[in-house]
Amino acid sequence: MSPRTPSRRADYAELTRRAIIDAARTLFVRRGFFGSKIDEIAELAHVAPGTVYAVGGGKQGLLRIMIDEWADAPELKESLERLPGLRDPREVLALVASASRKVREDHGAVMRVLLSTAPHDETAAEGLRESTERYRGTLTATAEHLHELGSLAEGIDVRHATDVLWFYFGYSGYLTLADDNGWSLPDAERWLLVQCERALLR
């Protein structure tokens, strides 16, 4: 077998792993982290309960995997890579708005699970702290870039700008507009972008 050709066993193992993660995410959203059972995850993923433990390490391990996937979201890395090359402040904010919307599309379910579970579970709380710190770091880099461009409104420093970016593009903006009010994510992105421009830029 060519070293470049993955074995069928490896392919099957990855498909099984993916099925378990997807099943856990579905149940965590539908029934909550504490209301979901390993047997139910196994049934939905069409595997034995022992396989869930072996592949994911139980519910805590599966939640940790989801957190890590969110942390490694390519949108955040790509945004940081593109940021220094942007000289128009409105393009900078449009990049943040677009990236945050894409992260919501891919990982919004995990965010909701973490936010509801963190007050009662240390794994979720730790994951939420780590993710928030990493995400706010991206927004701080954005605020610093806007400051260097001389684009921030009078009286707004980097710390204030970071807080404003978090207000619009942190967890609550999209959750309120999309989940509570039924907006589409693209509509929410457009509205949040316009409001953020008005609040931050000269």
Image (cartoon, rainbow, N blue to C red):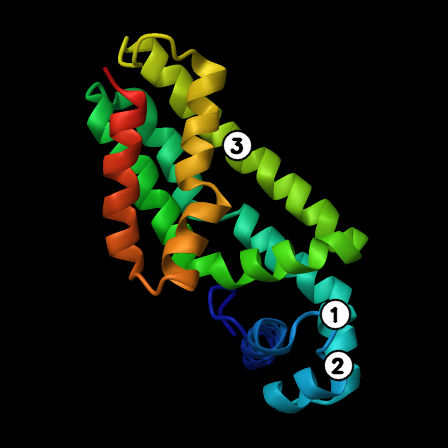
Q: Is the Cβ of the residue at disc 3 closer than 8 Å to that at disc 2?
A: no
93 horizontally vs 23: left or right: left
Question: What amino acid is found at the position of numbered circle 3 in the picture?
Answer: Arg
Q: How many marks?
A: 3
Quadrant containing the C terminus is top left
Q: How crowded is mark 2: few (under 14 residues within 10 Å), some or many (20 or more)?
A: some
Residue that carries the numbered disc 3 in the rendered image:
136
Q: State the CA–CA distance, disc 3 to disc 2.
A: 33 Å
Q: Which mark sits nearer the N-terminus, 2 or 1?
A: 2
Question: What amino acid is found at the position of numbered circle 1 in the picture?
Answer: Lys
Closer-to-camera residue (60/116): 116
**Looking at the image, is 81 positioned above or below residue 151?**
below
- Image point 75% across, 72% down: which residue? 34
56 horizontally vs 3: left or right: right
Q: Position of residue 196 (x, y in %)?
A: 31, 32
Q: Is the Cβ of the residue at disc 2 closer than 8 Å to that at disc 1?
A: yes
Q: Is residue 92 in view?
A: no
Q: State the CA–CA distance, disc 3 to disc 1.
A: 27 Å
Q: Position of residue 64 (x, y in %)?
A: 69, 57
Residue that carries the numbered disc 2 in the rendered image:
38
187 horizontally vs 38: left or right: left
**Looking at the image, is 23 positioned above or below residue 157?**
below
Residue that carries the numbered disc 1 in the rendered image:
59
Q: Which mark sits nearer the N-terminus, 3 or 1?
A: 1
**Looking at the image, is 141 positioned above or below residue 150?**
below
Mark number for residue 8?
A: none
- Image point 73% across, 78% down: which residue? 52
Q: Is mark 2 on a helix, strand or loop?
A: helix
